[in-house]
Image (cartoon, rainbow, N blue to C red):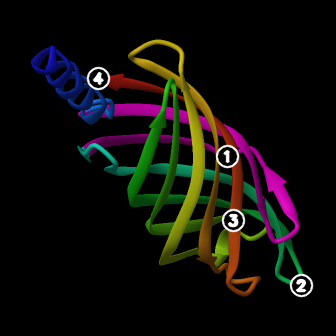
Amino acid sequence: MKKTLLALALVGASTSAFADAWLYGGVSVGRADYNNNSDTPMSFHVGTGILPIIGVEGGYWKHGNFDMNNGTANGYAETGSWYGALKPSIDIGPIQLYAKGGIHHYTASYKDGLASEGDSTGTDLMYGVGAEYFVTDMLSIGASWQTFNGVKTKFSDDKNIESFTLNATIHIF
């Protein structure tokens, strides 16, 4: 009896240890706010669970287009970031709660009346939190909030881009 209980405990522990996917990828869409403007961000991400409670993730965010003015001309900045982050997580039944923190490299490309301004680029920190519900073993849907720090355009000081998104992720075990 004791051996049977010990075997069940070990199987349960190994199942939860492999609850994080070896490889996953997904997409997000939602609302982003920057410098008193908002737009619809879209992103894709890929990652791997290197340990049962921590993973590594990377991807690209198209934050959106944000109105700008240089004093004589109007236009907008098309903003995007490549990022890499650590992603600690905890599974509670079919729900996964997670945080992420890392760095991002952003580009702001100016359009319309500001097209002659060139691009702004930089690197800073990013972080976020989220929750996902596993609809099946391989598919999760969820919501997340991210902040991309220090996005500086030629027409504004360092500002953060904050996003709230809905996501869908495919997990390959």
| Residue pointed to by mark 2 | 71
Which is nearer the N-term, disc 3 or disc 4? 3
Residue 22: x and y in percent read 23, 33
The answer to whether mark 3 and mark 4 are in CB contact below 8 A is: no
The numbered mark at residue 161 is 3
Residue sitting nearer the eye, 76 or 96: 96
Which is nearer the N-term, disc 2 or disc 4? 2
Residue 119: x and y in percent read 56, 73
Q: Is residue 76 left or right of residue 13?
A: right
For the C terminus, the image quarter is: top left
Q: Name the residue type under label 1.
A: Pro
Between tags 3 and 2, which lies in front?
A: 3
Measure the C-alpha gap from mark 2 to mark 4. 51 Å
| Residue pointed to by mark 1 | 41
The answer to whether mark 1 and mark 2 are in CB contact below 8 A is: no
Residue range corresponding to the magenta coloring: 22-49
Q: Is residue 110 left or right of residue 68?
A: left
Q: Is residue 71 above or below residue 105?
A: below
Label 1 sits on a secondary structure element that is loop
Q: Name the residue type under label 4.
A: Ile
Measure the C-alpha gap from mark 3 to mark 2. 23 Å
Within-10-Å neighbours for mark 3: few <14, some 14–19, many 20+: many
Q: Is residue 34 left or right of residue 57?
A: right
Residue at image coords 48%, 57%: 100
Residue at image coords 31%, 31%: 16
Residue 133: x and y in percent read 56, 26
Which is nearer the N-term, disc 1 or disc 4? 1
Q: Is residue 75 left or right of residue 162?
A: right
The answer to whether mark 3 and mark 2 are in CB contact below 8 A is: no
The numbered mark at residue 172 is 4
Within-10-Å neighbours for mark 4: few <14, some 14–19, many 20+: some
